[in-house]
């Protein structure tokens, strides 16, 4: 048994022990998301337009993540549509930022690993990095949307006649409570993932200007900043869609079967 298999089994057992049926559903959603990500890589390798793959895969992963993690219809529908709206906005933003930054492709630090290999794969690296940046934000978007939607659902359950302005204020208050933790999670994930690269930079006596202009560093910091923006935008988006759902009169007790 490999270490990855062992850790996967430990994760599954802990998720079931702590979360019960919901934990098992979350573990299944993790496996399904991995499968769809792998399928997206295959599609891009076969020259399917990366932007189309990004949108299709992003929507599918958001649906799996959200609808398999909660049974309340009002919460899941609100979180899903908010996540889709944020994803569409981010794809446009990512395209503009990545086109301007020109950080696609491989950096000088990858030259040893790529020695003897051809990088002429017939696919635009700009489109590939847009796909990478967009898909890397999905977890943060879904988490923030679910937190806001679940909190507002509880509030509407206690105060069904709450005005739109008060509901908007409540959503922003919930957002203030989760933004700090989420942003720190994203930051330390970024820093931990690139710690070896930072040590390498220090060992090679890279100047600050060289580091901030390094292609690997720039592409990663762009992805993190995009994730920050995604979390912040998700807060008002989820709140406004919850208000819209309230006016549509969705029964808060209806359960997805």
Image: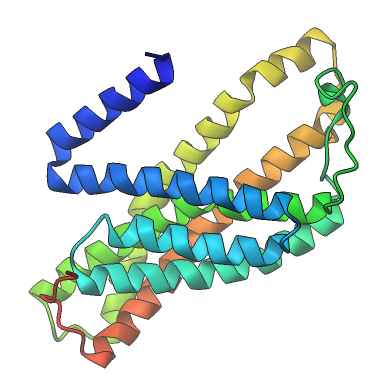
- The answer to which of 115 and 110 lies nearer the viewer is 115
- The answer to which of 28 and 171 lies nearer the viewer is 28
134 vs 154: above or below: above
Residue 211, picture quadrant:
top right
- The colour style of the image is rainbow
Q: Residue at x 82, y 44 (%)?
A: 103
Residue 12: give x, y in percent of width and height: 26, 32
**Quadrant of the snapshot with the N terminus:** top left
- The answer to which of 153 and 132 lies nearer the viewer is 132
Q: Is residue 4 left or right of residue 218?
A: left
Residue 158: give x, y in percent of width and height: 9, 73
Residue 193, picture quadrant:
top right
104 vs 198: above or below: below
Q: Residue at x 51, y 73 (%)?
A: 85
Residue 187: give x, y in percent of width and height: 54, 36
**Quadrant of the snapshot with the C terminus:** bottom left
Q: Residue at x 16, y 67 (%)?
A: 154
- The answer to which of 71 and 12 lies nearer the viewer is 12
Residue 78, picture quadrant:
bottom left
Residue 98: give x, y in percent of width and height: 78, 54
């Amino acid at each position: 048994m490999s270490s990855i298999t062992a850790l996967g089994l430990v994760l599954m057992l802990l998720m079931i022990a702590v979360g019960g049926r919901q934990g098992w559903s979350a573990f299944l959603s993790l496996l399904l998301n991995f499968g769809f990500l792998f399928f997206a890589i295959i599609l891009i390798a076969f020259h399917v337009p990366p932007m189309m793959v990004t949108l299709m895969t992003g929507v599918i992963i958001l649906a799996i993540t959200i609808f398999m993690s909660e049974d309340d219809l009002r919460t899941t529908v609100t979180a899903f549509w908010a996540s889709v709206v944020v994803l569409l906005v981010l794809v446009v933003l990512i395209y503009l930022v990545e086109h301007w930054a020109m950080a696609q492709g491989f950096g000088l630090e990858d030259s040893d690993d790529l020695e003897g290999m051809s990088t002429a794969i017939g696919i635009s690296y700009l489109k590939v990095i847009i796909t990478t940046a967009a898909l890397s934000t999905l977890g943060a978007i879904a988490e923030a949307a679910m937190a806001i939607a679940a909190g507002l659902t509880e509030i509407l359950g206690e105060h069904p006649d709450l005005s739109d302005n008060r509901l908007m204020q409540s959503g922003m208050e919930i957002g203030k409570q989760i933004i700090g933790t989420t942003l720190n999670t994203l930051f330390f994930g970024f820093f931990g993932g690139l710690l070896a690269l930072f040590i390498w930079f220090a060992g090679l006596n890279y100047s600050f200007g060289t580091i901030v202009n390094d292609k690997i560093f720039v592409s990663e910091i762009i992805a993190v900043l995009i994730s920050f923006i995604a979390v912040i935008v998700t807060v008002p988006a989820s709140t406004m869609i919850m208000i819209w759902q309230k006016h549509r009169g969705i029964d808060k007790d209806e359960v997805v079967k």
